[in-house]
Image (cartoon, grey):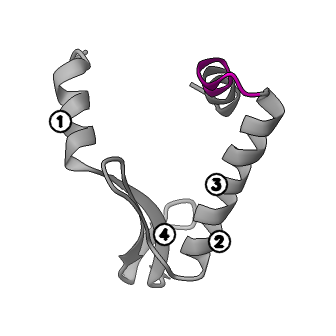
Amino acid sequence: MTKADIVAKISEKEGMEKADVQAVIETFMETVKDSLESGDNVYLRGFGSFIIKKRAEKTGRNISKNTTIKIPAHNIPAFKPAKVFVEGVKSNVEVK
């Protein structure tokens, strides 16, 4: 499912104009992004959390030059689904 599919589905379900739904979704994503970039996690009860994960420094390999490199410690954005969300997927989605 793409962002356009989500906009179409919400527009149809709520009887709103697609442009209005698009604006709300864009604002939501921008707000989540801005919050994470400023160091704040975003918690959506019953859905999940957008969190900042810390990655420790590690040693990697550049296989083309056959050398080792240090990868510095850094933060990455991540999504942690709520327990209700995980259980819903487990019980409703067939294992392939």
Say which amino acid is labelled 4: Ile
Report the span colored magenta: 10-16
How far apart, in angstroms, are the residues tagged by discs 2 and 3?
A: 9 Å
Question: For residue 76, which numbered disc appears in the image?
Answer: 4
How far apart, in angstroms, are the residues tagged by discs 2 and 1?
A: 29 Å
User: Which residue has dot 2 on it?
Assistant: 34
Question: For residue 11, which numbered disc appears in the image?
Answer: none
Residue 40 placement, left or right of 85: right
Percent of width and height locating residue 95:
21, 18
Question: For residue 87, which numbered disc appears in the image?
Answer: 1
Can you say whether 87 is above or below 54 in the image?
Answer: above
Residue located at (21% from left, 42% from top): 84
Question: For residue 29, which numbered disc appears in the image?
Answer: 3
Say which amino acid is labelled 3: Met
How far apart, in angstroms, are the residues tagged by discs 3 and 4?
A: 16 Å
Snapshot quadrant of residue 42: bottom left
